[in-house]
Image (cartoon, rainbow, N blue to C red):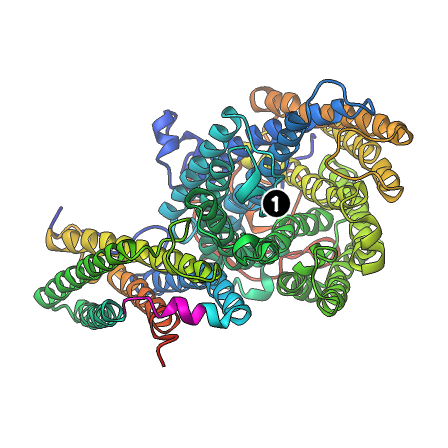
Amino acid sequence: MSEAPALLHEPWPSVERQREGATFGLWLFIATEILFFSGLFLGYTLYRNIYPDAFKIAARETEVVFGTVNTAILMTSSLTMAVASRSATRGFRKMTLLCLAVTITLGCAFLVCKGLEYHDDIDNRLVPGPDFKLEPPETQIFWAFYWVMTGIHAIHVTVGIGIVTTVTLLIARRRLPLATAAVEAMALYWHFVDVIWIFLLPLLYLMGRS
Amino acid sequence: MTDITIDRFPDSKTGESYLDEGHSLASWLTTTDHKRIAILYALSITAFFFIGGFAIGLVRLELLEPHGLFLTDEEYNRLFTMHGIIMVWFFLVPSIPTTFGNFLLPMMIGAKDVAFPRLNLMSWYLFVIGATFTIIMIVAGGVDTGWTFYTPLSTLYANGNVIAAAAGVFVTGFSSIATGINFIATTHMLRAPGMTWTRLPLFVWSIYAVSVVMILATPVLAMSLLLVVVERWFGVPIFNPNNGGDPLLFQHLFWFYSHPAVYIMILPAMGVISEVFACFARRKVFGYTAMIYSLMGIAVIGFMVWGHHMFVAGQSPYANLVFSFLSFVVAVPSAIKVFNWVATLYGGQIVFKAPMLYAMGFLGLFTVGGLTGLFLASVPIDIHVTDTYFVIAHFHFIMVGGSVSAFFAALHFWWPKITGRLYPDYWARFGAITMFLGFNATFLPQFVMGYEGMPRRYHVYPEQFQVYHVISTSGTVLLAVAYILPLFYLGWSLFYGDRAGRNPWHAAGLEWEAASPPPKDNFERTPTVTGGPYSYGEDAEPRAHTA
């Protein structure tokens, strides 16, 4: 029975409808996620308007090299994910698996870079608290948002890696058919996480450097 | 209850009921059947309803004496907080959607299940995890911030278990998001042939509207609580005024969820009432289209009124003006609904069965709750009664008088469908009337003492208010009777009640075409829908046929 894993599940009337449903459900989830992050973006915007100078001082301390490298990594992973999604629908099995593997690797590389950057930030006493190196105290708010925003984003990347790895293994072992709607759905999620990063980059790294 | 159901289908022996699909605990805990998940939810929220009720019972007892009877300040704070957190997030928000929504939405649209059955089960487990955090919070001593977690109290000063409490609410939030996504996808993708959008029962529309609010508002609550936890745990300043942070920002984020959350609680109730009125007045719901637009209108405008919780919190007067105006606007669709319900009853052949009595209770109490909402929407009056018992009475009229009455109406209306049994109508009607009287005795005095200046969240108060508190507490006893009574007669009906048959109320909904209790796949064959949802009285026509 491992040769022909079922593609159609209850309660769907057809495979096509089921695929539409999975994508639609994921779009709804993305709507939720946007509102989730919007709380952070709203807070950031508000404080940046109240304390523009403190935010400029604080933003100059972020590691723009890491930020740029990570942007490149994530964008590339989005490309490989898009290729994987397309090849899955066309039935290119090897190409799909290869691209998914590259996507996972790039996701991990992103996390490693992020970890190195966090290490530098901690060394530079950029964790808000009594030991914080910058003045005035409002700079701590910027860094609070830095940690929370990048932290939550990194959690999303980690979850994404977990999902992509699971699906890749299931496809590789033929437990899941190549034509599963899961590939397209998780590709949507992955792109969404990348898009969040595109917003974080200017807010956290590019601001205060002009 | 001797009248026999209309049976357009002969009782087929094919397909046992969903209750017979397995009797082991494991078969329940791993089920993906929407009907069984609804039962799991129903048991969980009922447990929480009584825990939260117990907490407020102690609070009401304490308030018998102006100087307090037996609680310290700290204990009192923790008890009313526990009541608020449990009743809002572990009873009211999930109440109708996760139980009746889960059970009925697929049946009402002629589907076999919700769109994502495994996600549906996962949402229940998320609820359980959140509930576990909350139980841990309670056992560890509770929390004293009030259910609103206002900063800087919650982040800098409170001694209680803020993190466990916030974690519980955070996780439960994702359970309602998962449910919301599931319901929206189900309504869009799985309607039976012929079930067009304008043939959907209003209950389905209300669940659809509430799902939209759930998936768009809940994540904002999740973020605001996450920020509270981060600030409290790591000392990172986000709302801390010492670093230039703004506590008002928290209130904005919190109420951006928590005001729409009121509509999460009341919209499904409105759906229930529409179904019950149509059935027991034997009439088509008056102004079906207007009912849909008003549901969606409430869902949308409900997102734009959160500032009325902050009239005295230091918000700009211009913002107050706008939020005040919008709060009046949101009353318009609610009023449309009330008038349409009354018009539905007008000229109807009304039968006062238990569900109808609960629904009539809803109509009166919701109207009072809604009208006092207008008092609070106008800034000058709100300044006078902010944080008094007037506010408490107002929102309890909506949430308890409205939502809980509707929950009981739904419970009594669909009990024969869910369990296949009839309950003793006499006791159910007795319960409905007791609930209405007990509710009014409890909360009407609170309007008076609130208007005269009794502040909320105090257990020591001037003696002039004692008489109102005593009346209110005695009303609580009646309410408790009304809430506990159904446990007995509904429990009795499970074993000794008469078989209900498919359609004991002669109701028109598609769910009544299925057997009671329904088989796992709901219908023997996928139904084809040929008419609108309320074919009662003279326009009665066959609703659906199986192709």
Q: Which quadrant, please, contains the N terminus of chain B?
A: top right
- Residue B99: x %, y % from top left: 54, 41
Mark 1 residue type: Thr
Q: Which quadrant, please, contains the C terminus of chain B?
A: bottom left
- Residue B83: x %, y % from top left: 63, 33
- Residue B288: x %, y % from top left: 69, 63
Give the quarter of the image for residue B503.
top right
- Is B110 or B172 nearer to us in this picture? B172
Would you say B495 lies left or right of B315 here? left
Please determine whether, in this image, residue B229 is positioned above or below residue A206.
Answer: above
Give the quarter of the image for residue B323.
bottom right
Which subunit holds the residue at mark 1?
A: B
Residues in magenta?
A55-63
Would you say B249 lies left or right of B520 here? right
Total residue callouts: 1
Please determine whether, in this image, residue B458 is positioned above or below residue B222.
Answer: above
User: What residue lies at 24% left-to-right and 58% top-to-bottom?
Assistant: A120
Please determine whether, in this image, residue B248 is positioned above or below residue B96.
Answer: below
Is residue B418 in view? yes
Q: Which residue is mark 1?
A: B148
Residue B385 lies within the magenta run: no
Is residue B349 in view? no
- Residue A134: x %, y % from top left: 40, 61
Q: Residues within 10 Å of mark 1 (few under 14, many from 20)?
A: some
Residue A56 lies within the magenta run: yes
